[in-house]
Amino acid sequence: MKKIIAANWKNNGSKKFVKDFFDYFLDNVDTKNEIIFFPPDLYIDQVNNYRNKEIFSLGGQNLNTNPFFKTTVTGANSCDMFLDNNCSHILIGHSEVRAQYNDTLIFSEQLKHVNGKLKVIFCIGEEELDRENNSTSEKLSELLDTLVKNFKITHIPVFVAYEPVWAIGSGKTPTLEDISYIHRFIKNKILEKLPSLKEKDIMVLYGGSVNLKNAKDILNTPYVDGVLIGGASLDVKEFTNICNLKI
Ligand code: PGA
């Protein structure tokens, strides 16, 4: 079954890294899975130059971060700029961005203003403390409310990345049962709030310490439509092998 395999490079890379990565990747990737790269903004154009075979799509890691979105913002990029650079996706609310803005207002604004042509991957996840306090579902519901309140028809399919904050970059992952349970919870919650949607309109990716050892099991877990990979996506051999997995 076709799955989404997304690479979040965060603030890693260089021109040489991009060249070496794609020289290997394009020679060795062999998959029907849908692959999306989220390079740092400064390298999007360079990565785009390797898209000749349309083997992968491109996305931006973050949108304009001014809550008063329409004003000019030094250091920010607009939706149109991402589109102009052939991006089809945008991450909104990654936990590393959430940590800088202790307020969901910013993500409501981003969702409101995102250009309908960019597909949003809305990132949610509980902190370690939420998990310890058994309040994971409350935390996820709160974050999902931002999504459903600002939902637009252009957001179909709805992409959510479930990324437990305690699992990001830590080498720890939830059990497969927990991943499945939470993905189902997310899908049901969205369907409950947006009853006009169908289950097939909602794609939930798992993110947090995905690597070659655990990717196949995670991708085979019920209700998992794909993965969002940070650290392991920087190792071209490991990432290529994950992309080539037959699920
Ligand atoms: P990780 O990062 O795979 O390094 O845990 C995932 C993410 O932050 O999207």
Image: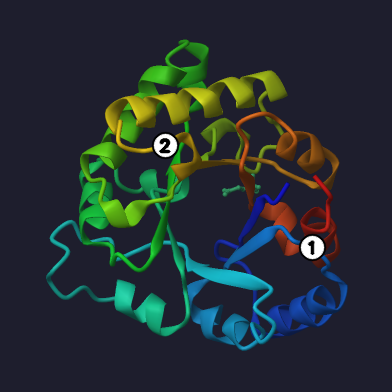
Give SS at disc 2: loop
Which label number is shown at residue 92? Answer: none
On screen, residue 115 above or below 107: below
Give the quadrant of the C terminus.
top right
The residue wearing badge 1 is 31
Residue pictured at 50% horizontal, 80% vertical: 42
Total labels drawn: 2
Tag 1–tag 2 contact (CB < 8 Å)? no
Quadrant of residue 232 within the rendered picture: bottom right
**Residue 73 figure quarter:** bottom left
| Frontmost residue, 201 versus 13 | 201
Q: Which residue type does callout 2 highlight?
A: Lys
Q: Secondary structure at mark 1?
A: loop
Query: Residue 120: x, y in percent?
Result: 40, 56
Q: Is residue 77 visible?
A: no
Categorize mark 2 by other alpha carbons within 10 Å: few (<14), some (14-19), many (20+).
few
Which residue is pictured at 24% across the width and 50% down the height? 106
Asked if residue 188 can be seen in this view, the reply is yes
* Residue 164 falls left or right of residue 145: right
Q: Earlier in the sequence, mark 1 or mark 2?
A: 1
Q: Quadrant of residue 220?
A: top right
Q: Could you classify mark 1 by the number of other residues whose Cα lies within 10 Å: few (under 14), some (14-19), or many (20 or more)?
A: some
Decide which of 197, 94 is in the foreground and name it.
Answer: 197
The residue closer to the viewer here, 5 or 229, is 5
Image location of residue 217, percent across then percent down: 79, 34
Q: Can you tell which of label 1 and label 2 is closer to the viewer?
A: 2
What residue type is disc 1 on?
A: Thr
User: In this picture, is 64 found above or below 214?
Assistant: below
Give the percent coordinates (x, y) of residue 170.
67, 37
Residue at horizontal 71%, vertical 24%?
176
Q: Which mark is residue 198?
A: 2
